[in-house]
Image (cartoon, rainbow, N blue to C red):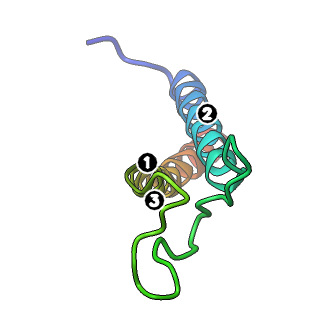
Amino acid sequence: MEFLSEKDQLKNLIAQRQSLEAEADAIFSELTSKGPNGEPPAGIKTPLVDSEGFPRNDIDLVNATSKRGRLAVINNDYKVLMSKIEELLHRIHG
C-alpha cells in the first residue's frame, strides 16, 4: 500500500467533499422542485401524508423517502469528512 503525503490526503478529502456536496445539491434540487406535471415538491421535511393521514398521492413516496435517507447519510458523512479535513489542516500548518 502506498503512503500518501498529508497534502495528497487533503486533496483526496477535498475531492470527496466536493462529490458529497454535488450529490446533496442534486438531491435537494430534486426534492424541492415541482414535478413534471406541476405537482408540488416532496420537500425535505414536509409530511409525506395528507391532512387525513393517508400517504400523499401527488409524489413518489418511495423515491422521496429514499432521497431523504440518502441526504441524511450525506450530511453525516460530510460532518465526519469536514472534521478530518480540519484535523489534517492543523497538522499541515502546525
Q: Is 51 located above or below residue 5 in the figure?
A: below
Category of crowding for the residue at label 1, using alpha-carbon neighbours closer than 10 angstroms: few (below 14), some (14–19), many (at least 20): few
Q: Going by the image, does 91 lie left or right of 35?
A: left
User: Residue drawn 69% across and 56% down?
Assistant: 32
Q: Which residue is mark 3?
A: 72
Which residue, as the protein is rendered here, is positioned at the far left?
A: 1
Q: Which mark is residue 14?
A: 2
Q: Nearer the viewer, mark 1 or mark 3?
A: 1
| Residue 1 place in picture, x, y as percent | 25, 12
User: Residue drawn 45% across and 59% down?
Assistant: 72
Category of crowding for the residue at label 2, using alpha-carbon neighbours closer than 10 angstroms: few (below 14), some (14–19), many (at least 20): some
Q: Earlier in the sequence, mark 2 or mark 1?
A: 2
Q: Which residue is mark 1?
A: 63
Closer to the camera, 89 or 34?
Answer: 34
Three-letter code, disc 1 = Asn
Q: Are marks 1 and 3 in contact (CB under 8 Å)?
A: no
Q: Cα distance, mark 3 to mark 2? A: 20 Å
| Residue 85 place in picture, x, y as percent | 57, 45
**In the figure, residue 26 lies in which quadrant?**
top right
Three-letter code, disc 2 = Ile
Q: Nearer the viewer, mark 3 or mark 2?
A: 3
Q: Earlier in the sequence, mark 3 or mark 2?
A: 2
